[in-house]
Image (tube, helix red, strand yellow):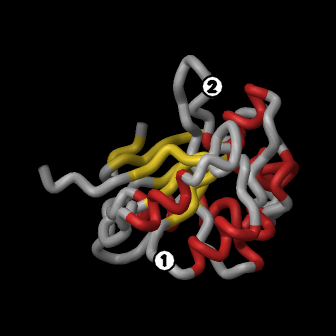
Amino acid sequence: MGLKPKIHANELGLTGGVQVGVANNAISVDHLEYTSEVEIEVLKNSDTLPTLLPGCAFFLGIPFAPARQMMDAGLPVVLASDYNPGSCPSGSMPFVVSLACAKMKMLPEEAVNAATLNGARAMELEQDYGTIAVGKIANVFITRPMMSLAGLPYAFGSKVVEAVVLGGKRY
């Protein structure tokens, strides 16, 4: 049918899902709470993106994916919410960014990049979304004043977003 695979992999154990995803040229392998050096090496030799879902690990009380190890290996980590009633009943991306920094050792800049540009790449939409640039669709959020980008993950649970702009229209 022409669909490109996105694989649900290694949420509850080392299942071989990463290897299956890479072997089938998946756009991404999503979850990766259980990831060893073997899976990191497999991902390094592919175009498949590792998508991490820290809200799921938080809600289910399972290990957080080894984001720092993946990034230190040169992988372009993606962050997503996994918003669903069974394993992550929250779609809050500010909370996802906070968890990534607090529990997965990501720097604020890395977490924001993983949630924006790399998130757009994982959906194959990076030509139009993911960064603020001439010619791209203006989807952004406006926060309350902060001393630095580090304020975003630090203020977990706080309402930091004042406005959302979608397609250039403020909501």
Q: Amino acid at mark 1?
A: Ser
Which residue does the numbered mark 2 point to in the structure image? 87
Residue sticking out furthest to the top: 85
Closer-to-camera residue (50/142): 50
SS of the residue under disc 2: loop
Q: Residue at x 54, y 49 (%)?
A: 30
Query: Pointer 1: what residue?
Result: 46
24 and 149: which one is in front? 24
Number of the front mark, 1 or 2: 1
Foreground: 36 or 69? 36
State the quadrant of the C terminus. top left
Residue 166 appears at what percent x and percent y?
37, 47
Figure check: 106 above or below 167: below
Secondary structure at badge 1 equals loop
Q: Earlier in the sequence, mark 1 or mark 2?
A: 1
Q: Is residue 63 above or below residue 87?
A: below
Is disc 1 surrounded by few (<14), some (14 to 19) or many (20+) residues within 10 Å? some
Between the C-alphas of marks 1 and 2, the distance is: 28 Å
Q: Is residue 43 visible?
A: yes
> Would you say residue 144 is visible in this rendering?
no
User: Can you give x and y, in whole percent of width and height, for residue 65 in the image?
Assistant: 74, 52
**Rendered residue at 71%/57% (across/down):** 35
Tell me which amino acid carries mark 2.
Ser
Left or right: residue 113 versus residue 117 is right
Q: Is residue 73 left or right of residue 127?
A: right
Tell whether 125 sits left or right of 109.
left
